């Protein structure tokens, strides 16, 4: 058995290694065109010096975004993205991970395939209603419960 597997692997390798080109003149490299293309290129320097004022401004922006309250973080979740994730990956609970659910809730979604699809479908309907009514998904974000539409 081992010999037949090794023999078939060698036969496959020999067939795959053959060149299917009829002659070497079929493929050529135009050195002049390559040199022209390289000479016309623009050099980009990504290591330009940055002033201390720019660095401190960027650090201030990072510090401000890190200290944002949870309500503004919840408001930053896009309901369209949550709805699309729920549409295509609802059974796996990817929309719940996006909205900041507890890790065990996401694991429960994966293990039960979204409550046999029923819970995932209800989540989809809830997100659709929130999207149509333009009320946002703030009340559904960071919800640790398996049923996101239930009370907190």
Image (cartoon, rainbow, N blue to C red):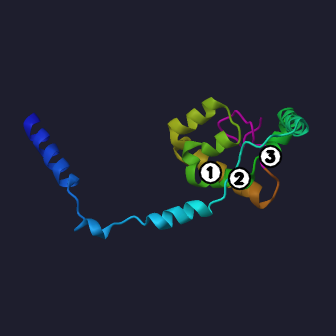
Say whether residue 7 is left or right of residue 31. left
In terms of sequence position, does the residue under pointer 2 or pointer 3 come before the other? 3
In terms of sequence position, does the residue under pointer 3 or pointer 1 come before the other? 3
Mark 2 and mark 3: span between their CA atoms? 15 Å
In terms of sequence position, does the residue under pointer 2 or pointer 1 come before the other? 1
Main SS of the magenta segment? loop
Work out whether residue 87 or residue 68 is closer to the camera in this orientation and state it: 68
Say whether residue 27 is left or right of residue 69. left
From the viewer's perspective, is the residue at label 3 or at label 1 nearer?
Answer: 3
Determine the image quadrant of residue 37: bottom right
Residue sitting at x 71%, y 48%: 45
Residues marked 2 and 1 touching at CB (< 8 Å) = yes
User: Residue 147's spot in the image, x, y percent?
Assistant: 67, 39
Residue, disc 2: 127
Q: Quadrant of the C terminus?
A: top right
| Mark seen at residue 142 | none
Residue sitting at x 56%, y 49%: 89
Query: Pointer 1: residues within 10 angstroms few (<14), some, or many (20+)?
Result: many
Residue 147 part of the magenta-drawn span: yes
| Mark seen at residue 76 | 3
Q: Is residue 151 visible?
A: yes
Q: Which residues are magenta?
A: 137-152
Mark 3 and mark 1: span between their CA atoms? 17 Å
Residues marked 3 and 1 touching at CB (< 8 Å) = no
Residue sitting at x 60%, y 51%: 121
Residue, disc 1: 86
Query: Pointer 2: residues within 10 angstroms few (<14), some, or many (20+)?
Result: many
User: Residue 99's spot in the image, x, y percent?
Assistant: 71, 42
Work out whether residue 3 or residue 149 is closer to the camera in this orientation and state it: 3
């Amino acid at each position: 058995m081992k010999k037949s597997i090794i023999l078939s692997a060698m036969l496959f390798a020999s067939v795959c290694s053959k060149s299917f080109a009829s002659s070497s003149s079929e493929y050529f490299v135009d050195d002049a065109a390559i040199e022209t293309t390289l000479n016309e290129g623009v050099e980009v320097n990504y290591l330009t010096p940055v002033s201390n004022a720019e660095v401190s401004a960027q650090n201030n922006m990072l510090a401000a975004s890190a200290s944002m309250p949870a309500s503004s973080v919840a408001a930053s979740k896009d309901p369209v993205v949550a709805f699309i994730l729920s549409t295509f990956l609802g059974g796996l609970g990817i929309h719940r991970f996006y909205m900041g659910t507890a890790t065990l809730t996401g694991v429960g979604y994966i293990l039960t395939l979204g409550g046999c699809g029923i819970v995932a479908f209800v989540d989809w309907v809830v997100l659709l209603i929130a999207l149509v009514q333009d009320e946002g998904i703030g009340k559904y974000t960071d919800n640790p419960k398996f049923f996101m539409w239930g009370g907190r």
